[in-house]
Image: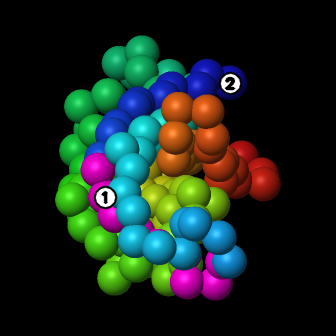
Amino acid sequence: MFYVTKEFTFDAAHNLVSYHGKCEKLHGHTYKVHITVAGEPDGEGMVVDFLELKAIARSKAIDLLDHSYINEIIPQPTAENIARWIFERVAPELKRENCRVYEVTVWETPTSFAKYRVRDI
């Protein structure tokens, strides 16, 4: 099994309405995202073409979140919920005979991240 990952970044604002602390106030982040596809190489020797992965991830998730107020897109936009939202938007587009989206990781800060992963591949 191979694991192929593409990295993205986007800037956005959010606040955590069901949270008691400083993150309940409006603030922003430069998010980093890894989308990992697991599978076996196809006839061209690739699990997934990086260009295709980039185009799908951007059109289905990243470009929608970039420079947005994420609360208007994802209720309670924690790193966990953002990771799941991205996974659910991208995974159907990359479900192939030879591969599937395996995991999405979202960094809210350089040292804090959440992962959402499929249970079975």
- Disc 1 marks which residue? 12
Give the secondary structure at mark 1. strand
Query: Residue at point 66% right, 78% down?
Result: 19
* Amino acid of disc 1: Ala
Viewer can see residue 54: yes
Q: CA distance from mark 2 to mark 1?
A: 34 Å
Query: Residue at point 65% right, 49% down?
Result: 114
Give the secondary structure at mark 2. loop
Q: Estimate the x, y position of residue 35 in percent, counting from the top left.
A: 48, 40
Q: Estimate the x, y position of residue 49 in percent, counting from the top left.
A: 32, 29
Indicate left or right for 46 with 102 as reference: left
Chain-order first, disc 2 or disc 1: 2
Indicate left or right for 86 with 67 as reference: right
Q: Front-most of 29 and 94?
A: 29
Q: Front-most of 30 and 82?
A: 30
Indicate left or right for 1 with 100 as reference: right
* Amino acid of disc 2: Met
- Disc 2 marks which residue? 1
Q: Front-most of 30 and 56?
A: 30
Indicate left or right for 48 with 39 as reference: left
Vertical position of residue 12 compared to residue 76: above or below: above
Tag 1: Cα neighbours inside 10 Å, few (<14), some, or many (≥20)?
some
| Residue 51 lies in the magenta-colored region | no
Vertical position of residue 43 compared to residue 8: above or below: above
Viewer can see residue 57: no
| Residue 14 lies in the magenta-colored region | yes
Viewport quadrant of the N terminus: top right
- Which circle marks residue 34 in the picture? none
Q: Give the magenta range.
A: 11-19
